[in-house]
Image: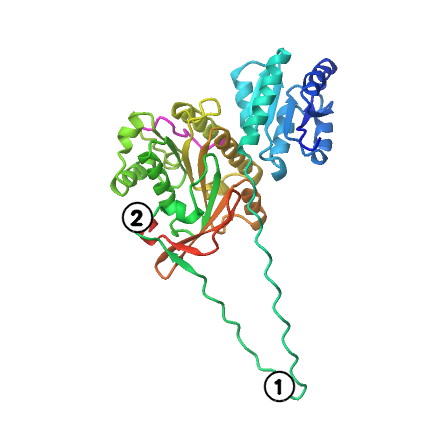
Amino acid sequence: MADRKKIFIADDDRFFRELYQMVLGEEGYDVTFAITGSEAVEKWPGNDPDLIILDVLMPGLNGYEVCTKLREMPDFAMTPILMLTGLSADDDKIKGYNVGADDFLTKPFSPKVFRERVKNILDRSNARKVVAAPASAAAAPAPAAATAPAEAPAVASTPQKAAEPVRRLEPGADVFQELFGGPVPHGVNVLMTGSLGSGKSSLSRLFLAEGLKHGEKCMFICLDESPGRIRQTLTAKHGVDAAALEAGAALRFIDAYSWSGGRIPAEEPFAVKGALDLSELSSLVTEAAEELEQTDSAKKGGRRALDSLSSLFLKFDLPYIQRFIAYLARSGQFADVTTLFIIEQGTCDEQALNNIKYLMDGVLEFKQDDQRFLAKVQSLKWAPAKPEWLDLTQRAG
């Protein structure tokens, strides 16, 4: 059957492999096995699985190491991973989440629990898959220019670059519906890229402010600006009472900014202590998400913004950053939380940027032109993208 879900399992225990085959085979899944972590690494690229199940304790590469290698490959950055383990300590599970696992199941478990866990993970993953918008038809090639007679000297002409169309944002219009051509779906990930000072951060704060005004819970992950400054902006510019919303468990700030100055404000409950560490940052995001009920079990949805990924490239290697981005993207999708990621133009090379774009459901490009702040959609997976720039000067400038 063309729609049979494919599951790839790495486990060195024959008893459990037979159990998996019996339980999953009865449900109509197409199951492929590897006995060691090294064999899994060799086999999985050709299998394109819908779900990967890894035992933690295997000879050679263990489950954590296999998960790390898998998350470094863009093709598998969003594939759900269930880890099976006889280890029950919280630290073991946290380690699994930090290397990119989506869920844990502790051995021994009943076939019924295993069956339901697999079904729920696949259902969540399937619900979050969006259909890519049809690619626009390639432009027809321009007719070949006539060959000039041999005796006539060729006259060089300088091609004039056509001005790109710009739309005005009408007063009272919803800036995000105008940009995306309709409502932004829950649980999507959007990358905002452009030069420094082109309006990306301003628009991300507007996005959170609009969500808060409509009763959505929001999180701001602060890397380039202090939470205090963002609170002031939300209150003074957007009319949002940040303090009241925090007291009502509707707004949370992750302070990954203040550590660099050596002073963590006492009012910041979710703050990186000491040097910035992405494992600690992931844990803080998870803790804040639980308070906001932005989890795959509560599924209350909401909005998040991370400003900005550029800071991470100054401290961490690309694979580590990609795993962190993939963690945020997957956790947001499963919890129906829409997440904005900001990155400054020129922060990383083109290949690295493309790897990040691969994880996204949409990409926004920003620029400042003649004192105007402009933005347009580079790509979109849930709808056709509008090709022209939108003038956001009055809203995000």
Magenta-colored stretch includes residue 276: yes
Image coloring type: rainbow
* Amino acid at the residue labelled 1: Pro
Image x and y of residue 100, in percent: 56, 29
Q: Mark 2 to mark 1: distance in Å?
A: 57 Å
Image x and y of residue 213, in percent: 31, 35
Residue 153: assigned label: 1
Q: Quadrant where the N terminus lies?
A: top right
Residue 26 shown left or right of residue 238 in the figure: right
Above-or-below relation of 58 to 314: above
Residue 58 visible to the viewer: no
Local SS, label 2: loop
Residue 145: assigned label: none
Q: Nearer the viewer, mark 2 or mark 1?
A: 2
Task: Find residue 132 and report its image quarter.
Answer: top right
Q: Which residue is pictured at 73% across the width and 31% down the height?
A: 43
Going from the N terminus, do you reach mark 2 or mark 1 first?
Answer: 1
Magenta-colored stretch includes residue 172: no
- Magenta range is 266-278
Image x and y of residue 250, in percent: 34, 28
Q: Which residue is pictured at 26% across the width and 29% down the height?
A: 244
Image x and y of residue 358, in percent: 57, 42
Residue found at the very far bottom of the displayed protein: 151
- The residue at which mark 2 appears reads as 172
Task: Find residue 230 and report its image quarter.
Answer: top left
Q: Which residue is pictured at 57% across the width and 24% down the height?
A: 121
